[in-house]
Image (cartoon, grey):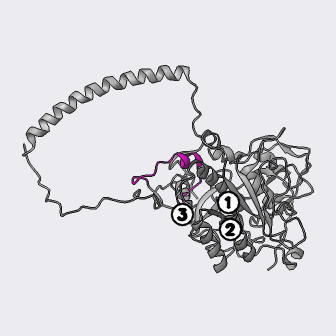
Amino acid sequence: MTLRRRTGGFGAAILVAGLLLSASPAAAQASGPASGVVSSSRDQCLAATRISQTPPALDKLQSEAAWELTRGAGITVAVVDSGVAPNPHLDDAIIAGVNLVPDGTDGIGRTDVYGHGTVIAGQIAARLIPKSGVQGLAPEVRILPVRVYAGDSDQQVEAGFGPNTARMAEGIRIATDRGAQIINVSMSTTEKNAALADAVAYARDRGSLVVASAGNRDSTSAVEENGSDGTRYPAGFSGAIGVAAANDAGVVTSASIRGSHVALAAPGQNIASAWPQGGDCAVATDAPATSYAAAYVSAAAALVAAAHPDETPAQWAYRLEATAVRAQPDTRSNSSGWGIVQPYDAIVLVPGSGLRGPKSPFPGAASTPQPTQTPEAVAVVVGPGPDAAAITLATGIGVGGLIVLGAIGALAVLVSRRREETEPRRPAPTGRGLYGDAPAD
């Protein structure tokens, strides 16, 4: 297995994305561990670097509307990744984690020489700091760092510090045992590994939801290099949500691996987040990356879990999938799954048998009443039938009722309009709503 790092300029892409960097020279690019696309080099995004604008993805993910209901307080999200470095955006978010990489660094997962895990954590939980607009989608959750690899250079891989399925599986189990309700795994492998499958099942059975990247066409930094479509793991195991990446236009491009393991999509391009040196950085400016899309779905899942703490991981996942934006309400696709996640809609969803889309895990929500006996034959009557008198009486009562209801309705409208004049309105969700118009894949 050979994992390589790519470099190149990306200053112009930041301008296109409308991200304003201060105290930072034109940055270089390097691939992320599961992304296969770009992230800023460690020596260019500095402690003083600040991105003044709000991450573009937050507007597409109904953040303001969702935050009126919850900001994720009380939820722990595990970041099974390259560690989470100290950063002022995250200082109040991180709890003591674990380091499974035997490279002599700290034992609580706070070393991140690669940068990837810190970006993921920032997308999920970054708190606002002076002069920066960077913020996570679930800015009150706790982050549990679970360090399972150090990097993807040839030297790190040869030393045994690169990505591998054994530490990935162990990391999921530890995250579960440490009480993480949501477990972000922005990594992928083509191997249907039994230990990894058992780890996902272990998490599911104990109340944790695994969110994993669906994989990228450029797989130079995956566990193994394979750019063909097909199932990736742990995304493909029961109990996990596989996430594809959408570009700035909301389209899941060919950069994401396609397959039956894709359940949802989220923004994965031009990501503004925290960086290990202590500042901000923009990543994935060339193409969308499923690593970063998975982070936003993990944050959305955390918001849902905070709003519905008594529900199961399967029910949280259903809320996210049923309300995702897609062109065809009844159909998932191998490219974007059930569509682009919309956390506000997922939170306020009232599960019921009339909803279209994925199969519901809520008791009785998707059931159709079955006849308890053989029904009588239907009689087609021409002219007044045996129920004519009863129908006439019911019609008269119904017309009278409609007149009364109309008067009540008019009064209600008048009262409502007067109330709206004196009470502030809650801003409408900025997403596209249930089954909104989704761009074609």
Q: Give the image location of residue 25, x and y in percent.
A: 92, 49
The residue sitting at 68% across, 70% down in the picture is 173
Q: Are marks 3 and 2 in contact (CB under 8 Å)?
A: no
Taking the image as shown, residue 378 lies to the left or right of residue 197, namely: left
Taking the image as shown, residue 386 lies to the left or right of residue 1, namely: left
Amino acid type indicated by mark 3? Ser
Q: Give the image location of residue 135, x and y in percent.
A: 75, 45
- Disc sitting over residue 142 in the figure: none
For label 2, the residue is 215
Amino acid type indicated by mark 2? Gly
Q: Are marks 1 and 2 in contact (CB under 8 Å)?
A: no
Give the extent of the magenta segment: 338-355
Measure the C-alpha gap from mark 3 to mark 1.
29 Å
| Magenta stretch: dominant secondary structure | loop
For label 3, the residue is 333
How busy is the neighbourhood of tag 2: few (under 14 within 10 Å), some, or many (20 plus)?
A: many
Tell me: residue 105, above or below residue 379: below
